[in-house]
């Protein structure tokens, strides 16, 4: 019985050593395979100069009176100015569907002296007309025409337009192809110096597309022209 137990113990130890040894060789093989993979991680850049395809801007007009009794007349004057501005915009090529008029806002302001005695007051009505259009090349002309109303006594805040580029999906494929091609060029330069060749792609990471006003570090709505930029990070296999 004692001899039989010794045999079982020896057999168990032998199996354990065999499994451990096999595990070592499997692990060592996987490690050797991993360290034998030569790769190069490079970045590829692609840039485009594009033109905005959508513009938005707002025109604020204000009429002011000195007494509350003047408010009804102020309202009629505000409506007249609103119609005049819209008519001018349509004359300069903007469709009615591109123009929207907001509600009139009423503001009452009191002016008092150091003894809190009322010395003056102002009653104002302000309205906003917004334009959203794809006719980006007509915006400058339209804004100049609206500014001419100042000579007719209009109190106008002709706000700066916001230019947007909304067709990024149209240029994405070509830009990603270019960025990948530039990354391979960089990898080839590295491989040539190392005396190896560039193989296939092991992994690729697309960076975010960045849109900025042309020539600017910040902002993407002030200029008609935009710079679009993307950077990809690609890992290539290297072969002998």
Image: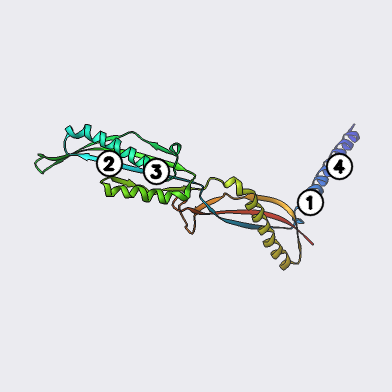
- Dot 2: what SS? strand
Quadrant holding the C terminus:
bottom right
- Dot 4: what SS? helix
- 96 with respect to 108 (left or right): right
Q: In the rendered image of this protein, does residue 233 appear above or below residue 106? A: below
Name the N-terminal-most of marks 4 and 3: 4
For label 1, the residue is 28
- Residue at (47%, 53%) from the top-left corner? 224
Is label 4 or label 3 in front? 3
For label 4, the residue is 14
Name the N-terminal-most of marks 4 and 2: 4
Instruction: Give coordinates of residue 113: x percent, y percent.
Output: 11, 43
Say the numbered circle drawn on residue 213. none
The answer to whether the residues at label 1 and label 3 have Cβ atoms under 8 Å apart is no
Decide which of 174, 33 is in the foreground and name it: 174
Q: Distance between the residues labelled 4 and 3?
A: 94 Å
The answer to whether the residues at label 4 and label 2 have Cβ atoms under 8 Å apart is no
Decide which of 237, 214 is in the foreground and name it: 214
Instruction: Give coordinates of residue 237: x percent, y percent.
Output: 74, 56
Is label 2 or label 3 in front? 3
- How packed mark 4 is, by other alpha carbons closer than 10 Å (few <14, some 14-19, many 20 or more), is few
Say the numbered circle drawn on residue 62. 2
Q: Distance between the residues labelled 1 and 3?
A: 77 Å
- Residue at (71%, 63%) from the top-left corner? 188
- Dot 1: what SS? helix
Decide which of 222, 178 is in the foreground and name it: 222
Is label 1 or label 2 in front? 2
Name the N-terminal-most of marks 1 and 3: 1
Name the N-terminal-most of marks 1 and 2: 1
Is label 1 or label 4 in front? 1
For label 3, the residue is 89
């Amino acid at each position: 019985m004692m001899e039989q137990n010794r045999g079982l113990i020896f057999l168990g130890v032998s199996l354990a050593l065999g499994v451990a040894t096999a595990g070592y060789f499997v692990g060592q093989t996987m490690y050797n395979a991993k360290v034998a993979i030569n790769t190069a991680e490079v970045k590829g850049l692609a840039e485009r100069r594009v033109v905005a395809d959508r513009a938005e801007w707002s025109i604020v007009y204000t009429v002011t009176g000195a007494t509350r009794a003047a408010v009804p007349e102020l309202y009629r004057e505000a409506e007249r100015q609103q119609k005049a501005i819209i008519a001018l915009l349509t004359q300069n090529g903007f469709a009615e569907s591109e123009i929207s008029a907001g509600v009139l806002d009423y503001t009452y302001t009191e002016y008092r002296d150091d003894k809190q005695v009322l010395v003056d007051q102002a009653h104002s009505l302000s309205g906003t007309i917004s334009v959203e259009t794809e006719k980006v090349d007509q915006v400058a002309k339209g804004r100049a025409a609206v500014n001419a109303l100042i000579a007719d006594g209009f109190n106008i805040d002709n706000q700066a337009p916001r230019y947007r580029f909304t067709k990024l999906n149209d240029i994405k494929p070509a830009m990603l192809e270019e960025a990948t091609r530039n990354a391979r060029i960089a990898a080839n330069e590295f491989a040539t110096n190392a005396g190896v060749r560039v193989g296939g792609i092991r992994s690729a990471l697309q960076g975010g597309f960045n849109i900025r006003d042309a020539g600017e570090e910040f902002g993407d709505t002030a200029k008609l022209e935009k710079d679009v930029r993307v950077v990809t990070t690609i890992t290539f296999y290297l072969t002998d």
